[in-house]
Image (cartoon, coloured by chain):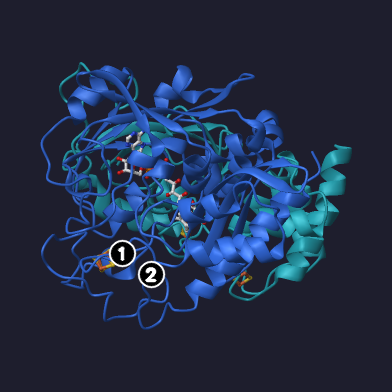
Amino acid sequence: MRPFTYTLADDAPAAVRQATVPADAHVRAPVQLMGGGTTLLDLMKLDVMRPDAVIDITPLATARYGNIEASTTELRLGALVRMSDAAEDPAVVRYYPVIAQSLGLAASQQLRNMARLGGNALQRTRCNYFRDTSYAQCNKRNPGSGCAAIDGFNRLHAVLGTSDHCIASYPGDFAQALIALDATVEILSAGGARSMRFADLHRLPGSTPHIETSLAPGEMITAYVIPAGPWTRRSTYTKVRDRESYAFALASAAVALDMDGATVRSARIALGGVATVPWRATEAEALLSGKPLDETSATRAAEAAFAGAKTHEHNAYKVPLGKATLVRALLTAQAMEL
Amino acid sequence: MIDGNETGFSRRTFLASGTVATAAVPLAAQAKGRTMDQAAAVRAETGVPITLRINGGNHRVTVDPRTTLLDTLRERLGLTGAKKGCDQGQCGACTVHVDGRATLSCLTLAVAAQGRDITTIEGLAAADGTLHPMQAAFVDNDAFQCGYCTPGQIMSAIAIVHDGHANDANTIREAMSGNLCRCAAYPNIVAAIEQAAVQMKRG
Ligand SMILES: Cc1cc2nc3c(=O)[nH]c(=O)nc-3n(C[C@H](O)[C@H](O)[C@H](O)COP(=O)(O)OP(=O)(O)OC[C@H]3O[C@@H](n4cnc5c(N)ncnc54)[C@H](O)[C@@H]3O)c2cc1C
Ligand code: SF4
Ligand code: FES
Ligand code: FES
């Protein structure tokens, strides 16, 4: 790890001011905010991230940033809430099960205790060529250097949202729940507070895979706001992994359904493990809307969700796996007893 | 050297004392309580004196801000119970409790652990040497082979009983999944936790 200065934040605007320094990409920004540090310190040890300064923002959890607030109209999750606390919060478990499950099925108990929701959404890809600096080629780590994964070992890589410059999959789980439930993300900038749709937070790799989000350097996520709806209770997260626990998703699906008997009023669907960013499957949603839900219609929706998939040498299995995962998630949500 | 090692002489402190004295240049300012307005943040090359509360006792030590809690425990304070398996948050061998929560000490900076209550495997047994019920249950159930993962397993196991995740074999397996055992002692670990959970709930 390279030398850095460590500062304990006691004031959010001051932390953001200190972190607002120009950088061409967040991964290369010289000042990094630190929540649980489970992504940041890991990547600093690997020499993938090399900040001069780390600002520990966990003391800000004593303010509203550390709160879970559930009302009849919305759920507000502070960015410094621990994954484990959100996963086990009774209101989240009961009224927003897809959120509780996406967090509870992620990482391990120790990591969930440490990691915070702000850093969680910003966790970085597990692409081995990104994490291992002995590979010269990685456009995300070293813009313009090429992509070692496209012709390399790409079993874990994405099939949706890829580009000729990067095929890394977005590794997180919670983000799928947020994008499916139309969450908003609240942000503190040097110029004041702003908010955006969670769906606008992550950016497709395109020709600039090193620019991963729409956050400017220094901007701090302060909260996520999730609107309540008839679909939030009938929601579920299905995650398929190489082993049954403590592994990243090979394929996952976050589903929230508003049902009128056996007919779908509206479906909200997001896919994980298979895409470069948290992925909203709008074509699949449209196919289900107003239709009865059964294995046949669910399968048709899953076909639509993966119609644009582009596979590489080792990851073609993700297309049938992803479809089967989505079908299972849809039928699980339908069968939920509320 | 200024390590406030209350555990007495050990191979580790002996090794550390040869190398650390020159590196430890105490700074006037403590990292704890440092505010954003104070310009001088803690810089790596200089080192910073910190106080860690471990197993109920205060330990003063000067660390480079890059130092993890795990390395501080093992290399500076002679507390070698927590193990380094992967150093990347992937194996759980380094698990300790921070404010009662199972935490990976390899992904925790020592400077960030100030003001917290840290418990390590060394802090579990009673003063007279009586083992914690979880330690005793691991012995009773033969819940280890080489023993390398065991301190981390035991720290996680105690935490999951306290957190209410040790209800049956399935919830135990899920809650313990962050602790890998290369010897695959898993069935006996689950049995040990089931046994200790009953005793710990009885009080
Ligand atoms: C072995 C292992 C297994 C894992 N398995 C899973 C899994 O199965 N599923 C899953 O979803 N995740 C998994 N993770 C990832 C883990 O969930 C993330 O590392 C964690 O959620 C990140 O949160 P943090 O608070 O530790 O972030 P940090 O490491 O503190 O920060 C991550 C990044 O976000 C920035 N940041 C942090 N907070 C803010 C904020 N409020 N505003 C703006 N920027 C911020 C930091 O500057 C940094 O760049 C795993 C991690 C490990 C090590
Ligand atoms: S897939 Fe993306 S992250 Fe992985 S090597 Fe290619 S450019 Fe880098
Ligand atoms: S040494 Fe910390 S998790 Fe492996
Ligand atoms: S007992 Fe050997 S690693 Fe677990």
- Label number found at residue A162: 1
Q: Chain of mark 2?
A: A
Rendering colour (chain A): blue
Pointers 1 and 2 in contact (C-beta within 8 Å):
yes
Q: Nearer the viewer, mark 1 or mark 2?
A: 1
Q: Residue at x 85, y 40 (%)?
A: B201
In the rendered view, tell whether residue A303 sits above or below residue A172.
Answer: below
Rendering colour (chain B): cyan
Is residue B64 visible in the rendered image? The answer is yes
Question: How far across and how far down the image is residue A164, in percent?
Answer: 22, 69
Q: In screen coordinates, is A292 left or right of B109?
A: right
Is residue B6 visible in the rendered image? The answer is no
Q: Tag 2: residue type?
A: His
Residue bearing mark 2: A157
Quadrant where the C terminus of chain A sits is: top right
Question: How far across and how far down the image is residue A280, in percent?
Answer: 45, 50
Q: Earlier in the sequence, mark 1 or mark 2?
A: 2
